[in-house]
Image: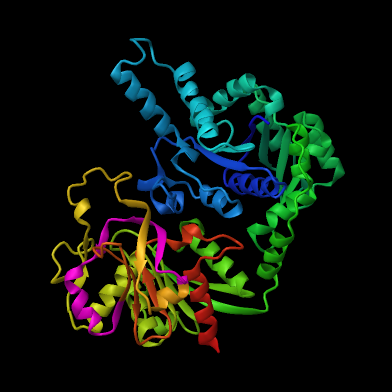
């Protein structure tokens, strides 16, 4: 079977959940025995989101090969077994950068470089390249932004050309749109969706499936109206109601709407029905857990939910594996700088300090680490979370006053955290950190070794600063355990405290490797320890 292509577009407004729709469809097709791959086209001119503000863009999701990508690729990896690479993520910036580099080399032989054909040809080439590099039965490509955005037009034009080239029997468009409920009128309105699809049809694209985001049931009359005015078959008008409890309900909802049947029929795919028994079991544990635990996340970007998306999902995965619901207490690290930690972290069973950049709120994170250490509360530090745990221990246990990171103080009395040697001559900020998967050697007899059940692991990184080994001996003497290092011992990857029930922190980002039915060992261990703390 030749590769079948599904393009996921969005209309009316942004944040409709195109990424979750693409990921959920991937789940359904994968459970039908098909090999699925997913790809994201982002229209912004940034080369990647690595230098973008988390408040604007949300978290940066890092892949095995070090690519810094949009958070939707996290949904793709969590919802399917696909292991993504840089080829699965394309931005306008990457496309234009490639085309302009060719022009500078003279590859176009003096021709005028234009959006059509040069930009659209590069977009189509990236579609074909992914299909050849990572063979699959179905490639689902999400187009970021909203239909009608000027920056997204080259991608839509490229898709129009591509569908002509591969044939309509091998490619369909799934359009995600909003059907708003107007309370004053007391009814759902279809006009925004009609206008959105009219815009697509102006470009030369006709969706075969309509996924309607709605607060209320669509009803037969609304479905029929959308079918007639949007030129989509009645049974291909799919209801995408807001989920009640968890995003992992979405594949089950879309299966009930027969989305996978419709897609397989439209693409002439013969495959058995999807068996979602295990997925349903996981969702049931998320919705109706037998116990609950309260965990504080002390972060710098706490007011934006998407900034720590993978961390929240990893806690959900770990909790479900223990039949435990997670009650999150989101604490702004800046608040801890001026308030008593015990007043903000009251009754929590665990404290998690995530990563981040810059000195804002760092002292609050340090106080959170101190609170967890002194009160024997289970603690998990991620990236910057490990660094602040190290600074706190150096200051308050080892008596190294003035201990700090050179990221926050260029000349601290005790540079516990310092810039990596490989970073000292770096001037370009984009894609220049220590990125991607790196091996870690874990010392036997440590809590980390027990948690992982292995002496060697591989985890994804994204950082410029590291623990300063000059202070290793002094801190070890006080009970600071260096349980994981790079294979040559030059970089500290994992630390723990000897005299604490459960206090672990890592330089890497374990949240990028957790899946619904495969929770990450560190998160599972942390939630389990938090449950024990309650008891």
Residue 423 part of the magenta segment: no
Given residues 268 and 216, the one toward you in this image is: 268
**Image coloring type:** rainbow
| Location of residue 232 (image quadrant) | top right
At horizontal 49% and vertical 26% (from top left) the residue drawn is 125
How many numbered discs sit on the rendered protein?
Answer: 0
Task: Establish if 506 lies above or below 248.
Answer: below
At horizontal 55% and vertical 65% (from top left) the residue drawn is 519
The furthest residue to the right: 220
In the image, taking residue 275 as reference, residue 409 lies left or right, namely left
Please state, as top left, top right, bottom left or bottom right, where the N terminus lies in the image.
Answer: top right
At horizontal 51% and vertical 65% (from top left) the residue drawn is 520
Looking at the rendering, the stretch of residues picked out in magenta corresponds to 452-481
* Visible residue check, residue 206: yes
* Visible residue check, residue 179: no
Measured as percent of width and height from the top left, residue 215 is found at 72, 53
Measured as percent of width and height from the top left, residue 418 is found at 21, 63
The furthest residue to the top: 110
| Location of residue 208 (image quadrant) | top right
Given residues 257 and 451, the one toward you in this image is: 451
Task: Establish if 112 lies above or below 373.
Answer: above
Residue 464 part of the magenta segment: yes
In the image, taking residue 371 as reference, residue 241 lies left or right, namely right
Please state, as top left, top right, bottom left or bottom right, where the C terminus lies in the image.
Answer: bottom right
Task: Establish if 331 lies above or below 177.
Answer: below
Measured as percent of width and height from the top left, residue 11 is found at 63, 37
Given residues 415 and 125, the one toward you in this image is: 125
The furthest residue to the bottom: 535
At horizontal 28% and vertical 77% (from top left) the residue drawn is 392
């Amino acid at each position: 079977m030749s590769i079948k292509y599904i393009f996921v577009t969005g209309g009316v407004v942004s944040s409709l959940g195109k990424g979750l729709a693409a990921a959920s469809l991937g789940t359904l097709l994968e459970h039908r025995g098909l090999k699925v791959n997913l790809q994201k086209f982002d229209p912004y001119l940034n080369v990647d989101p690595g230098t973008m503000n988390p408040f604007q863009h949300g978290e940066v999701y890092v892949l095995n090969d070090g690519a810094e990508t949009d958070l939707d690729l996290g949904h793709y990896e969590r919802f399917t077994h696909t292991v993504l690479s840089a080829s699965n993520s394309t931005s306008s910036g990457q496309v234009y950068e490639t085309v302009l580099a060719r022009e500078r080399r003279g590859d176009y032989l003096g021709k005028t470089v234009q959006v059509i054909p040069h930009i659209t040809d590069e977009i189509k080439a990236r579609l074909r390249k992914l299909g050849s590099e990572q063979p699959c039965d179905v490639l689902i490509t999400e187009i970021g932004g909203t239909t009608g955005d000027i920056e997204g037009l080259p991608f839509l034009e490229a898709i129009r050309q591509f569908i002509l080239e591969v044939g309509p029997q091998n490619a369909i468009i799934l359009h995600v749109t909003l059907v708003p409920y107007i309370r004053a009128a007391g009814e759902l309105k279809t006009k925004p969706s009609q206008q959105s699809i009219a815009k697509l049809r102006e470009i030369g694209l006709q969706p075969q499936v309509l996924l309607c985001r709605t607060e209320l049931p669509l009803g037969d009359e609304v479905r029929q109206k959308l079918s007639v005015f949007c030129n989509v078959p009645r049974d291909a008008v799919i209801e995408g109601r807001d989920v009640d409890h968890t995003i992992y309900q979405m594949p089950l909802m879309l299966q009930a709407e027969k989305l996978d049947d419709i897609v397989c029929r439209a693409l002439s795919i013969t495959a058995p029905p999807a068996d979602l028994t295990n997925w349903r079991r996981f969702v049931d544990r998320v919705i109706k857990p037998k116990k609950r635990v309260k965990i504080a996340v002390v972060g710098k970007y706490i007011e934006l939910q998407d900034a720590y998306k993978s961390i929240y999902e990893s806690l959900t995965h770990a909790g479900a594996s223990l039949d435990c619901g997670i009650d999150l207490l989101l604490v702004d690290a800046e608040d801890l700088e001026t308030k008593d930690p015990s007043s903000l972290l009251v009754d929590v069973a665990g404290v998690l300090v995530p990563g981040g950049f810059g000195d804002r709120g760092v002292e609050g994170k340090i106080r959170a680490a101190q609170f967890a250490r002194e009160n024997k509360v289970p603690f998990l530090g991620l990236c910057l979370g490990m660094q602040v745990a190290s600074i706190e221990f150096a200051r308050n246990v080892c008596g190294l006053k003035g201990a700090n990171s050179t990221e926050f103080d260029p000349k601290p009395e005790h540079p516990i955290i310092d810039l990596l040697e490989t970073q000292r001559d770096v001037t370009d900020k984009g894609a220049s950190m220590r990125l991607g998967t790196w091996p870690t050697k874990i010392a036997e007899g440590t809590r980390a070794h027990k948690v992982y059940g292995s002496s060697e692991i591989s985890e994804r990184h994204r950082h410029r600063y590291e623990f300063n080994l000059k202070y290793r001996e002094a801190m070890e003497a006080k009970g600071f355990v260096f349980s994981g290092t790079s294979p040559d011992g030059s970089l500290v990857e994992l630390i723990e405290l000897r005299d604490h029930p459960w206090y672990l922190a890592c330089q890497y980002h374990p949240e990028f490797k957790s899946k619904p039915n495969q929770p990450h060992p560190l998160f599972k261990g942390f939630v389990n320890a938090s449950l024990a703390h309650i008891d």
